Each structure stands twice: as structure tokens, then as C-alpha cells.
């Protein structure tokens, strides 16, 4: 395999390695990830009205997403631990499809990107919604988790078509 197609987290012998970013300059990095959870109309209405017995679903999910983004280096084995300078989790209610879209934005000044932090944050937020609502709907479906935007770093800016960052 040539250097262009090699996995960066494997050495020449196929061993797992953490990529050395020591020689890279510190730059401003930002990433946005999104995903959705679909649920029954009754469950969606309970979330929207704040009637879920476990409490304010979106407030708890928001904190869970931020906490997870901050701990990404502890969760993903070869991911660098980063000191985030900014992290938000926001929700959009989509009543026509009984879905909630979660969006996580993460930023840092660092030598490597924050894509994994944004993806981990949105995943944890959606899983928290599932956990808090599973008594109302065990058929909820999480999906569409993706990187919406990445700004900064050697590879340049990336934006996914069809999404507003």
C-alpha cells in the first residue's frame, strides 16, 4: 500500500499507532456533526411538551453531548485528547417526521482536528434521548450521523452538501 492510501493509525507492520502530530502547527480547528433520532408521535409530543417522567430530555442530552465531546480521547482508542475551547449541542424538532436533529459544534486551538469530538458529542446526545425516552418508545431509530463541516488543518475546509453549518 502506498503512502497515499495507507491508514494513518497503522505502522508498516500493521500495528495500531497514535499518529504523531508533534511537528504540526497549532491552528484554529472547528467541526460540526449532525444526526437524528426518529420516534413515535406520542413520544415526540412528550419530549416537546416536557412531559417525559425522567425530566427535561433535551437539557440532559445537551449536557451529555458536551461531556462526551470533552472525553472523546478517553472513548476512541487512538484519538488524541484535546482541550476544547468551545462546544455546543443544539436540537431542532421536526414534527412532520417525528424526528429530533442534534447538532454538535466543537472547536480548539490544536495540532489535530475536532471531527471526532463533534461526532462523539452528537452520538452521545442522541443516545441520551433514546435512554430517557425508551420507556415510551422502544422502536426509536438513530441515524444519519455525519460530519457537516470541518474548518482548519492541513486538509483544508470540508462542507457536506445539503446541510447548513
Image: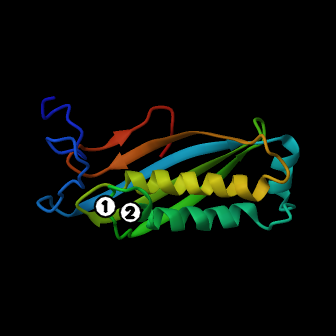
15 displayed left or right of 135: left
Residue at x 43% of width, y 36% of height: 160
Rendering quarter of residue 57 = bottom right
Is residue 112 or residue 15 the one in the foreground?
15
Query: Circle 2 sits on which residue?
Result: 73
22 displayed left or right of 94: left
Image position, residue 53 (x, y; %): 86, 65
Tell me the crowding category of disc 2: few under 14, some 14 to 19, or many 20 or more residues within 10 angstroms, Cα based.
some
Tell me the crowding category of disc 1: few under 14, some 14 to 19, or many 20 or more residues within 10 angstroms, Cα based.
some
Image position, residue 97 (x, y; %): 75, 35
As displayed, is residue 30 above or below residue 86?
above
| Pointer 2 with pointer 1, Cβ within 8 A | yes
N-term-proximal mark, 2 vs 1:
2
Spatial CA distance of label 2 from label 1 is 5 Å
Colour option used: rainbow
Q: Secondary structure at mark 1?
A: loop
Quadrant into which the N terminus falls:
top left
Residue at x 76% of width, y 66% of height: 56
Is residue 2 or residue 157 the one in the foreground?
2
Residue at x 24% of width, y 39% of height: 7
Is residue 147 or residue 95 the one in the foreground?
147
Marker count (numbered) = 2
Say which mark, if any, is on residue 9.
Answer: none
As displayed, is residue 25 above or below residue 92?
below
As displayed, is residue 155 above or below residue 88?
above
Image position, residue 113 (x, y; %): 31, 54
Q: Secondary structure at mark 2?
A: helix
Q: Residue at the top extreme?
A: 1
Query: Circle 1 sits on which residue?
Result: 80
Rendering quarter of residue 107 = bottom left
Residue at x 25% of width, y 44% of height: 156
90 displayed left or right of 93: left
Amino acid at each position: 500500500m502506498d503512502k497515499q492510501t495507507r491508514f494513518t493509525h497503522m505502522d508498516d507492520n500493521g500495528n495500531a499507532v497514535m499518529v504523531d502530530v508533534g511537528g504540526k502547527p497549532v491552528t484554529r480547528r472547528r467541526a460540526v456533526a449532525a444526526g437524528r433520532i426518529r420516534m413515535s408521535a406520542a413520544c415526540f409530543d412528550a419530549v416537546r411538551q416536557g412531559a417525559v417522567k425522567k425530566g427535561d430530555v433535551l437539557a440532559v442530552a445537551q449536557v451529555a453531548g458536551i461531556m462526551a465531546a470533552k472525553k472523546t480521547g478517553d472513548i476512541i482508542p487512538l484519538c488524541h485528547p484535546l482541550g476544547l475551547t468551545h462546544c455546543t449541542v443544539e436540537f431542532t424538532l421536526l414534527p412532520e417526521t417525528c424526528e429530533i436533529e442534534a447538532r454538535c459544534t466543537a472547536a480548539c486551538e490544536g495540532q489535530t482536528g475536532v471531527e471526532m469530538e463533534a461526532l462523539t458529542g452528537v452520538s452521545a446526545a442522541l443516545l441520551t434521548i433514546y435512554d430517557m425516552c425508551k420507556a415510551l418508545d422502544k422502536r426509536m431509530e438513530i441515524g444519519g450521523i455525519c460530519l457537516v463541516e470541518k474548518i482548519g488543518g492541513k486538509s483544508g475546509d470540508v462542507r457536506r452538501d445539503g446541510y447548513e453549518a
